[in-house]
Amino acid sequence: MIRKELTEIIKKKRSFLCVGLDSDINKIPGHLLNTEDPIFEFNKHIVNATHESAVAYKPNLAFYESMGSKGWISLEKTVNYIRSKTSDIFIIADAKRGDIGNTSAMYAKTFFETYNFDGVTLAPYMGLDTVSPFLEYDGKWSIILALTSNKSAADFQYIEDNDKVSLYQNVLKTARTWGTNDQIMFVVGATKAEALADIRKIAPDNFLLVPGVGAQGGSLEEVAKYGMNDHCGLLVNSSRGIIYASVDHDFAEVAKQKAVELQQEMEVYLKRSNLI
């Protein structure tokens, strides 16, 4: 999926919502535990409830890998189900891989061939060698960690060089040259919304994946204000605020309500920017 296609989905759905499938066997509604595949059953209901409001889904692979082979089966079934449900969707493997050489090439094959994800999150600490195997796939995205919202992000990401340029800014400047705007996306935490204006000066045309809206306290209004560009250029993720809004039998209905609320707010910001 190239940038133009993703932008058209955003305009069509009047949304730039990404639903994070951080599906934890210890948090899903108890009545699902008696089903054959509780995680897939949970995901299926969430997708059914939210796919009209969402333009993307982002399974967090840690929640699937932690369950061994059963988790990988649940993940594959989830991706296949999303594909069968709608073609107007972008699916991200939140894997945060960061290796080189043949290892990186195998990761690219895993996520882009075996599981047919549209994009994968990558840690760029080892430079271009980390990302280059992923760039060999047409229509696929390398989603590079730039500025994260966790407390200890300051340990490294804000370190300045002799020119007073922060490490995360150098990551943006360098990594955006590795591929085209149809290949390179950046992760920027919503709780760092005030930094988005400066980030847009460095990477004006790249898509930004912005986690942290909802349970983590990020402001959607500020993200849109500082991060939106002339083609939107945003995928804003909400995980717990949608999928765990209820843990009772009505969980899917409540998830739908939360997704619709975010979509309707996003529609306001898209209209303000004359994008729809």
Image (cartoon, rainbow, N blue to C red):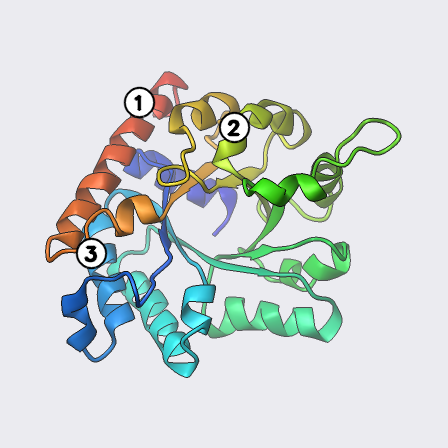
Residue 71 location (% of width, % of height): 38, 75
Mark pair 1, 3: CA separation: 24 Å
Quadrant of the rendering where the C terminus is positioned = top left
Is the residue under label 3 in contact with that under label 1 (CB below 8 Å)? no
Residue indicated by mark 2? 193
- Locate residue 71 relative to residue 97 in the image: left or right: left
Q: Which of the 4 quarters of the picture holds residue 54?
A: top left
Q: Residue at x 73, y 43 (%)?
A: 177
Q: Residue furthest left?
A: 249
Q: Amino acid at mark 3?
A: Asn
Q: CA distance from mark 2 to mark 3?
A: 31 Å
Residue type at mark 1: give it: Val
Q: Position of residue 96 (x, y in %)?
A: 57, 58
Residue at the image position 41 percent from the left and 65 percent from the top: 63
User: Can see residue 177?
Assistant: yes
Q: Amino acid at mark 2?
A: Ala
> In the drawing, what numbered circle is on residue 48?
3
Residue occupied by mark 1: 268
